[in-house]
Each structure stands twice: as C-alpha cells, then as structure tokens.
Image (tube, rainbow, N blue to C red):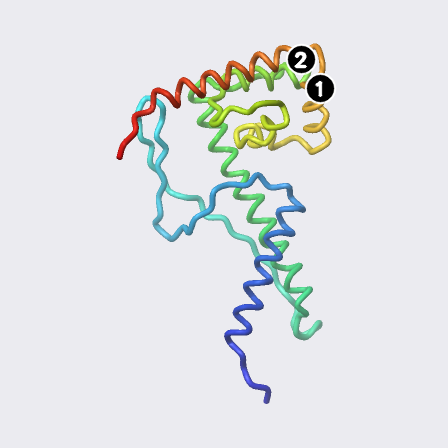
Amino acid sequence: MLPDFPLLKRDIDLLLWVGARGRAASISGAVPLPRRDVYEGSRHILVRENGEIVEGGYDTVSAEDSFQAGEAGTPSLRQVLESYTRLITEMDRKGRATFVELANEEAESRGQVVERAGRPLAEPIMEAVERMELDPAPRDVDELFLCQGMRVMLYELDQEAIEKVREELKREPYRARMTRLLAKKREEYRARESSRKLVG
C-alpha cells in the first residue's frame, strides 16, 4: 500500500482551488466583491446616509457536483480542477444575483432607479453617474468604467454592449457633457474629503 501524504494533498487541493478561482473569474467576468470569512450565524449591517442601521443575515449559497467513481475510477487532477471551476462559477453566479437584488432594493428605496425607457444607453448611464457618489472620482471615461458602482450597474450587460457604450461616451454628443459631469464629480469628491474629520 502506498504511503499517505496529507500535507501534500492539502497543498494540491489549495492549488486546485486557487486555479479554479482564477478560471471561474475569467469565465464569468464576475464583479469582484470584498471577501471575508463568513460563519453560521454571521450577520451584516447596512448604514444609510441618514444614520439608520439595517441589520440582516447572510443568504446561504451552495453548489453541488459529483463523480461516477465506479465508471471513471479516481478522477484526474484536471477533472478535479474542472469540477472546482464549475462549483465556484455556480456559487459566484448565485452570490452575484443575491448582491444585485440587494443593491436594486436599496436603490429603489432611495429613489435612485434610472429608467432607460427607449433612450440610447448612454443617456441613463450619465443620469445614473449624476446621482452616484464616486470615491475617488474618475478622471476619464475609462476610469469611470472601472468603478465598483459602474460595474454593478452594468452587471446584466454583455462585454460587447459595455465596450460600445464606453466608446460612445468618448465621442460627441456625449463627450463634452461627460467631461463636465466627471469634473463635477471630482469637485464633489474633494468637497467630501475636505469636510471629513480626522481622528487620531
């Protein structure tokens, strides 16, 4: 009988998970969200602008996969990697859906919903940016599209549509308006920063 190598198994398993995480992110184009360890009973709070605190629990997200060991024998490392990738992709999909649902509910409760109503996509995007607090405020359109708020807002669009509207915002009739809007956002950001109280 071959000897067991538990530490080697653990390290291989860790490498598989790290590789699967990278593959899943490239496949799904996931919106990167802050990550931390969450345990049974963990809770979160949402602090609104008016100081109101909303407390709630975390939704459970899970995924399943299986091997037919009797038919295929011991799975290869590549099969395990592909299985992990499927699991992580499915959990990311469910997690993002839950996050977007919460974000939509919060936006609706604050009257921050922008209706497209048949308008060119660039129009509601500019309207939404007008209402956003951007920290820090971007210098140009390319930086704007890297902001977390923008990535969440455009979550349901495919990459081709996102690239198309980003290029549209760099050209007239939107270019001058967007330049003024981003300048306004930077001024708002500087005003917020200057009003902060330093604690030390």
Q: Is residue 161 above or below residue 15?
A: above
Alpha-carbon span between mark 1 and mark 2: 7 Å
**168 over 162 or under it: above or below:** above
N-term-proximal mark, 1 vs 2: 1
The residue that label 1 is drawn on is 168
Q: How many marks?
A: 2
Q: Residue at x 30, y 25 (%)?
A: 197
Closest to the observer, 47 or 166: 166
Q: Position of residue 10 (x, y in %)?
A: 52, 69
At mark 2, the secondary structure is loop
Disc 1 residue type (three-letter): Glu
Please identify the quarter of the rendering in which residue 123 is found: top right
Element class at badge 1: helix
* Residue indicated by mark 2: 174
Q: Nearer the viewer, residue 186 or 25?
A: 186
Q: Is residue 142 above or below residue 182?
A: below
